[in-house]
Amino acid sequence: MQRPLTVALAGNPNAGKSTLFNALTGARQHVGNYPGITVDKKEGRLQGVEADVRVVDLPGAYSLTAYSQEELVARDMLALERPDAVVDVLNAGALERNLYLGVQLLELGVPLILALNMMDEAKKHGLRIDGAKLGKLLGLPVVELIAKKGVGVAELAKIVTDRAAMRAQHPEPWRPLVISYGPDLDDAIASMTTAIEAAGFLTDRYPARWVAIKYLENDPPVMEEGRRAGAIGPSLEAMAAKAAAHCNDTLNTYPEAIIADYRYGFISSILKNGVLSRDDRLERVEFSDKIDRVLTHKFLGPVAMLGVLYLVYKITFGLGRVPMNWMQDGFSLLGETATSLLPEGLLRSLLVSGVIDGAGGVLSFVPLILIIFMLIAFLEDSGYMARIAYMLDRVFRIFGLHGCSVMPFIISGGIAGGCAVPGVMASRTLRSPKEKLATLLTVPFMTCGAKLPVFILLTGVFFPRFQALVLFAITLSGWAAALCVAWFLRKTMIAGPSTPFVMELPPYRLPTWKGLCIHTWERTWQYIRKAGSVILAISVLLWAAMTFPGLPGEEAARYEAARTEISAALDNAKTNGDEQAVQKLTEDLGSADNERAAAALRHSIAGRAGIAVESVSRYAGFDWRTNIALIGGFAAKEVIVSTLGTAYSLGKVESGETTPLAEQLAGDPAWTMLKGVSLIVFILLYAPCFITVVAIARETGSWRWALFSTAFNTGLAFALAAGVYQIGTLMGLGH
Amino acid sequence: MNAQVNLRTLRKGQKAVIVSIAAQGELGRRIRDMGLVPGAEIAIVGRAPLRDPVALRVKDFTLSLRNNEADFIEVAILEP
């Protein structure tokens, strides 16, 4: 036996599947993605048994119908990988609904073991469950569990290993469960099954009867396969259509509905056969319902929700700021050390401005990401996230979004000062693909913390008396832009009816620390590993664009000569002890360096690009200096300030000390208030910083949408900024 | 048989049994997958602050759905 045994873990969301997976595999697990989609693929090794058993955690699903990506992934994994055993984790407190998936697994024929989880909760709710009886009726092992406390986990691990090992040694075909779907459908299923077997259609993967049922259920992926397989597809579709017409004529219903009825009928007949009984004396208002009376109350609910959202924001950025600053300080110390150790030149510039700044860019986000994932995992596992969606659905639906969209928006800067990187990652809670995409593409419009220094600078120059008010208006504009664009996208490029909201409101539960930590670490590590390398590479590219090709030889020589001259005079003055001259010459030396830096920037690829687009950008009032700064802003929005400083020969402008730059802008006749407003509009809306772009690519699973957001946002930002500038000029505001 | 009404019209605290579901396609599938089938007993747990969606109890768990999704479901009232 060389090959490890494979066990798949299936189950409904909120049935404690992750907790059981953690208990079975310990903390050693591997998280990846299924190719092309963003559903997580988790794997681990079974602990506490001698055999080598690989445990695959299937995404949570309510059914094996093709409703969501998760359900499809689960189905494909079972059919293609043929695990040696499948564990279905059930919430014993809602056994009937949970068995709906179990029965479908049995119809597929997988070697199933039922794990009745949360037996303690079920008992508390007055449910008496006879697991042994259930096992006898269905002909499979049933283990009763309280996974959170580790009760029954070892027993499950042993049974699973034994079963899997037995199957691996004595392989036998899967034996699908046959449920009768009533006289109206059974005949159709039988003749379709015969046709499928005769054609050998998908029989290597699925039982023929199962495929027949999928046709009656109008299952798109299976029907797609049929069309590719040739004549069998259309013929099965015709048979299914005939059965559907018959059902419609005689019963006024659809085959899908009949199938679901009979499945639930099969389940309830089993439960009534002595598996489930209720202690009615215990039927009382549940703990969760009591909490919901407050937390989803007409007035108290929204108030509490605003409080929670504000708290999440405060904790993320308040708590995150400290380690984030350490991280940034550490990297700038590293940069300074490298600067002092290495000789001046390209290598030093590459290392300090490209590599160290880039790595710092990647890692300084880690504390934020860690905290936001921790908080979101807490909100999800506790059940509160579902309530947020429930309360806000009515509002966000208007814009084609989901109630859960609120979290990414807030984190990205819906409260000014957020960050789109953790914001984009917070969109993971959205299970509806279209709503998630619209959210991902619009969160970068929010007023993130990196845009703030730029806005503070510009509002300080142009609206010194109303700075706070204007900053607030900018934040609201971010919301307005995000919601309007989401609405527009959902009407055009991501059109389609909203995903059904039919959603479970899971009972409130206290999450386990272990689960939270594992979850948080997995996600953060994924960010460092997968996004990190791309971000580093782009950071180096941007550095090159702002550095090369450098000053032409003669011009460099001229600056060098001027510098040498001033240096010599400075040395001279120092020897003579002429303090006034020393001070003046030191300043001259500084401005000579700054002028040289400005000239070098102008000659760089980014500078040339800035000059090249000036003929277009002037419609929004931007000159080449502004353009270069905006190009630099693609690295991170706060770079706009420092690049603007370099372009105005002011040397290195730190975002904390912008006074020289503010004076420059205030005194420059080219910088009118109108240009300021136009620039604010542009910066608020244009291309997200590339770290966000990488994050969007990872969350949507495609670079196409990431590039779309870069191009679309820039186009939109320019159109609006130019509109503001042109209309303002016409109204005579451009002075 | 008790009065047959649309699920949307039920008030908080009312109990009913599902009579028919007219939804097809993706929505119909989702509704059935979540345990809403003819014959299932439901109780209205509450409504969101903006009166939509509605939360209801079915098969020992709580489910929420929008009013325009509830429109597809006809119920017979058991307890006022």
Image (cartoon, rainbow, N blue to C red):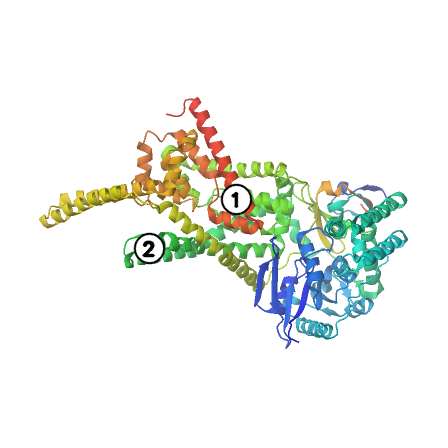
Q: Secondary structure at mark 2?
A: helix
Instruction: Depth check: give the residue in front, B26 or A193.
Output: A193
- A197 is higher (above) or lower (below) than A587: below
The disc labelled 2 sits on which kind of residue? Leu
Q: Chain of mark 2?
A: A
Instruction: Depth check: give the residue in front, A329 or A727.
Output: A727
Residue drawn at x 59%, y 43% is: A438
In the rendered structure, the answer to whether residue A686 lies left or right of residue A5 reads left
From the top left corner, tell me how far across and down residue A131 is, in percent.
77, 68
The disc labelled 1 sits on which kind of residue? Leu
- A474 is higher (above) or lower (below) than A242: above
- Where does label 1 land, which residue? A707
Residue A306 in view (yes/no): no
Name the quadrant of the C terminus of chain A.
top left
From the top left corner, tell me how far across and down residue A191 is, in percent.
87, 54
Q: Chain of mark 1?
A: A
Q: Residues within 10 Å of mark 1 (few under 14, many from 20)?
A: some
Q: Secondary structure at mark 1?
A: helix
- Where does label 2 land, which residue? A347
From the top left corner, tell me how far across and down residue B49 is, in percent.
65, 42
